[in-house]
Amino acid sequence: MTVMLDGERKKLIIRTSIIGFVFVGTVVVIIPLYLSSINYEKLSFELGIIRYSGFIPLIIGAYISLYCVKDFIIQGKGTPAPFDPPKELVVKGFYKYLRNPMYFGLFLFILGEVLIFSSIEILIYLLLLTIICNLFVIFYEEPKLLNEFGDSYKNYCKEVSRWIPSMKKRNKRRSSNQRLNTD
């Protein structure tokens, strides 16, 4: 494993910040805020003080996603963007328990917004976004990762679920030609 130079890491952080600001800002802030401002009395629901419990999944989701971004930069030597992906297969951190923890964190964040804003519109948006992300993962990301990382990714898929987190330890036995490092 090569050590990334500080200049390269800074460039990745800058690229990731720009991508994150535009994409994540739009997906988890602008669209939900717009949807929460739509006034459909018949679709709204009132949670009262319980709505503040939405800060729990929102904060946990933000933490998971940011932690995964860090792993993409440091271990993967790339960004979360499909047009600037990691060069190494990332299997550390939350990726030991779930193949798509960054999406999972994003979904938790938006679930928090559903509760905070008591918004059916954001709930519908979350459901549609979940379907779109699932299709994107199945038909774009997974074939691309399989093509790029081969048996390492295939074995990773056998051991780690796409969407349901598992706390069981992954099998540590690996052949010497596989690039999985979970420590």
Image (tube, grey):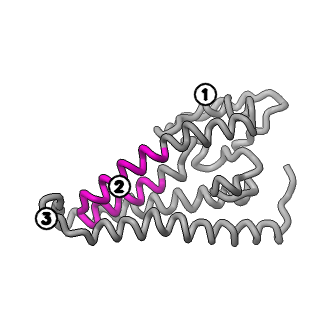
Q: Is residue 59 above or below residue 108?
A: below
Mark 3: secondary structure: helix
Residue at the image position 37 percent from the left and 53 percent from the top = 126
Measured Cα–Cα span from mark 1 to mark 3: 46 Å
Q: In the rendering, at what x and y percent does residue 171 appear?
A: 65, 29
Q: In the rendering, at what x and y percent does residue 41 appear?
A: 13, 64
Q: Is residue 161 above or below residue 85?
A: above
Q: Which mark is residue 41?
A: 3
Looking at the rendering, the stretch of residues picked out in magenta corresponds to 105-133
Using the rendered image of the protein, determine whether residue 4 is visible from the camera's viewpoint: yes
- Dividing the picture into quadrants, the one containing residue 32 is bottom left
**Amino acid, disc 1:** Lys
In this rendering, the label closer to the viewer, 1 or 3: 3
**Amino acid, disc 3:** Glu
Query: Mark 2, residues whose alpha carbon is within 10 Å: few (<14), some, or many (≥20)?
Result: some
Query: Mark 3, residues whose alpha carbon is within 10 Å: few (<14), some, or many (≥20)?
Result: few
